[in-house]
Amino acid sequence: MEIGPQCQKELNAQHDAGIIGDFMDWLAGEGYSLYTQDEDGDENVIHIPGAMSKLLYRYYDIDERELEREKRAILRHYQDQAAMEELTRQNKPGD
């Protein structure tokens, strides 16, 4: 089964994302915070542990909803394949 483009992006990003994630964890442990600034100039803190995956998805241009859809399709494919193999095994003569 061929994987979708969002899954491929996630696979390609995993090594770098691990390094970036470790650094962001270190930042949080050292007491550093990230902030965003809205249109009005107000600053909003970003809690690093909770925001890390969303930030990495944005950085690597991964559509989180599409990624989830692709992962569910892959799971369904392999579940269907396993069910067919089980039916074939059960209906095999001589067992």
Image: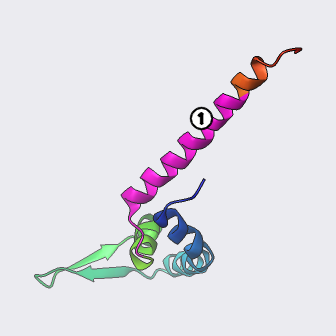
Which residue: 64% across, 37% down? 81
Q: Nearer the viewer, residue 82 or 33?
A: 82
Q: Nearer the viewer, residue 68 or 91?
A: 91
The residue that mark 1 highlights is 80
Whether residue 20 is situated above or below residue 85 in the rendered picture: below
| Residue lying farthest to the front in this orientation | 93
| The magenta stretch spans residue 76 | yes
Q: Is residue 63 magenta?
A: yes
Position of 80 compared to 68: left or right? right
Q: Report the amino acid beneath label 1.
A: Asp
Q: How far across and how far down the image is residue 24, in percent?
A: 51, 78
Q: Against 15, is 91 above or below? A: above
Name of the residue lying farthest toward the bottom: 41
Colour scheme = rainbow
**Above or below 92: residue 82:** below
Residue at the image point whose x is 42% and y is 79% from the top: 59
For the record, the magenta segment spans 61-85
Q: Position of residue 38 (x, y in %)?
A: 18, 79
Q: Position of residue 94 (x, y in %)?
A: 89, 14
